[in-house]
Amino acid sequence: GIELGKLLGKTGLVTLDPGFVNTAACSSQITYIDGDAGILRYRGYPIEQLAEQSNFIEVSYLLIYGELPTRTQLDDFAQKISRHTLLHEDLKRFFDGFPRDAHPMPVLSSAVSALSTFYQDSLTPFDDSQVDLSTIRLLAKLPTIAAYAYKKSVGQPFLYPDNSLGLVENFLRMTFGFPAEPYHVDPVMAKALDQLFILHADHEQNCSTSTVRLVGSSQANLFASISAGINALFGPLHGGANQAVLEMLEGIERDGGDVDTFVRKVKNREAGVKLMGFGHRVYKNYDPRAAIIKKTADEVLGKLGDDQLLEIAKRLEERALGDDYFIERKLYPNVDFYTGLIYRAMGFPTRMFTVLFAIGRLPGWIAHWREMMKDPATKIGRPRQVYVGPGERTYVPVTER
Ligand code: ACO
């Protein structure tokens, strides 16, 4: 109380807004969200149209450069990305240093951080052509790094990228293929994964994107800022939720599939149990991405195998949406409620789910870093605090304590 009074007296008004619930840290032209109406648009284009008609490379271009590319721009962009998919042979050796059972998310962030050491031209000062090159390097190399993190975890040999394939097909081949064996990319799987990447590609000032901007505001380069964003995404309240949802559904299945008992536990807050994949800081309505993903889950799981967990998820959703606890708090399924089921049907282990989110979110992070660097209003991010610790005290030597 006293210290707070002093702070206000000395420096003028300081707003205290834990979690930045009502505080905008920047203005942005990239993504529009209306959380009450359940609307999401990238650069003005509704997410439903992009998910249905576009592809991940084109959406990446749109987010980063602000406009849909012409055919020539798109071909050029895609070709540059496929030319940079290889990892430096020395970077490949980094993977040997991690324990075999390492979670792939910290492996991913470490490898991205290490890109600064291989591409020292990425350090300040930033000029446009260099930033374009770092952008291409990241978009091209993250799927390779992600596939190697997976191969390392299962003890299988790495595959070099095959640049006759598109980004998603290449990633699937490097993940599930074997050297010297032909790998047939399942078109249903490739299309569904491409669409999931589109749906994850940006979501304005979420925790990881704000992290990228905050780190970048100190003029840290693109690789360092994105590596920090990957670490922010790792948390179970953010990107880690897709893994947590699947573990929750498996737990319910193990307990006999009784969703009523689980919902009761959530409402009674037993041992801090939450309905993972539900609720969102901004959406107080059905997350538009979840609506698209639910449809994809039906299609993909129909083709790639029937799923007991999908049935539990649907019952759980129906049960929650009809319950006063969730209605009063405006808790609806978010993007992660159904994604894990699709990833699992594709053959990804649970620990890779958040890695897939990171590949999808990458163009959004890059777009925000670039927008911030160009914005003359940008200042180094430096939030204030309200000090509530002790007042002045006199030091007591250790012998007298
Ligand atoms: N299950 C049960 N109760 C919930 C849930 C949930 N999933 N989410 C929110 N609530 C309750 C809170 O306990 C709180 O109740 P109270 O007011 O009675 O205390 C109320 O709803 C408001 O929730 P807050 O935690 O204040 O909302 P906040 O905006 O801070 O949190 C968050 C949003 C973190 C997403 C939260 O809803 C959550 O933890 N959900 C589960 C994790 C998850 O799915 N995360 C993924 C988010 S999307 C993404 O990052 C891609």
Image (cartoon, rainbow, N blue to C red):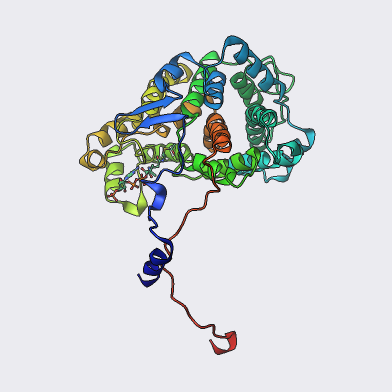
Task: Tell me the residue at 64%/21% (across/down).
Answer: 170
Query: Which quadrant: the N terminus?
Result: bottom left
Q: Which of 114 and 131 is in front in this view?
A: 131
Quarter holding residue 397: bottom right
- x, y percent for residue 398: 58, 84
- The answer to whether 220 is drawn above or below residue 2 in the figure is above
Query: Which residue occupies the extreme left position in the image?
Result: 324
**Can residue 356 be spotted in the picture?**
no
- x, y percent for residue 393: 48, 80
- x, y percent for residue 168: 59, 21
Q: Which of 191 and 384 is in front in this view?
A: 384
Q: Nearer the viewer, residue 270 or 147?
A: 147
- The answer to whether 162 is drawn above or below residue 285 in the figure is above
Q: Is residue 80 left or right of residue 230?
A: right
Task: Tell me the residue at 36%/54% (across/down).
Answer: 271
Q: Is residue 109 left or right of residue 19?
A: right
Quarter holding residue 77: top right
- The answer to whether 80 is drawn above or below residue 14 in the figure is above
Query: Which residue occupies the extreme right position in the image?
Result: 90
**Can residue 35 be spotted in the picture?**
yes
- x, y percent for residue 25: 45, 44
Query: How many badges with numbers are in the image?
Result: 0
Query: Which residue occupies the extreme bottom position in the image?
Result: 400
Task: Tell me the residue at 70%/31% (across/down).
Answer: 130
Q: Is residue 34 left or right of residue 166?
A: left
Q: In which quarter of the image is ligand 1?
A: top left
Q: Which of 29 and 342 is in front in this view?
A: 29
